[in-house]
Amino acid sequence: MKFINYVGYTDDKEKLAIHAPDHQRYMKSLLDAGKLSMGGPFSDGSGGLIIYEVATKEEAEALRDQDPFAISGVFVRSEIKPWLLLAINPGLVKQDG
């Protein structure tokens, strides 16, 4: 099941920059393990969206809690909700940047 994690970042851009490499490595490990469907930051730098592929909300929360951004205080808000993917246009789903 998919769980959306809508996160807000700290205003401390230095803290975000310091912990970004560890966060990116962690996201890559989740992707490789089949636990991350997709994710990325908002273009205004205020936060991001992470879509976990896990069985329970508790597992999604555990993945969030192990994220270097959560541990270091970059995440100042997090809202996790189950999400049902009912439609997708594969031609529009591509990686930016």
Image (cartoon, grey):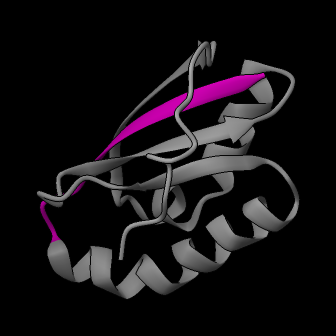
Query: Total label count?
Result: 0
Vertical order, 65 against 29 (above or below): above
Q: Quadrant of the N terminus?
A: top right
Depth order, front residue of 94/60: 94
Depth order, front residue of 36/11: 36
Residue at 63% over, 12% down: 84
Question: Residue 6's x, y, as percent?
Answer: 40, 34
Residue at 56% over, 81% down: 22
Residue at 38% over, 58% down: 73
Question: Residue 36's x, y, as percent?
Answer: 70, 50
User: For this view, does 91 lie left or right of residue 7?
Assistant: right
Depth order, front residue of 57/3: 3
Question: Residue 14's x, y, as percent?
Answer: 20, 83
Vertical order, 76 against 13 (above or below): above
**4 part of magenta stretch:** yes
User: For this view, does 46 lie left or right of residue 83?
Assistant: left
Vertical order, 28 against 49 (above or below): below
Question: Residue 13's x, y, as percent?
Answer: 17, 75
Q: Quadrant of the C terminus?
A: bottom left
Outermost residue toward the front? Answer: 91
Q: Which residues are magenta?
A: 1-12
Residue at 88% over, 60% down: 33
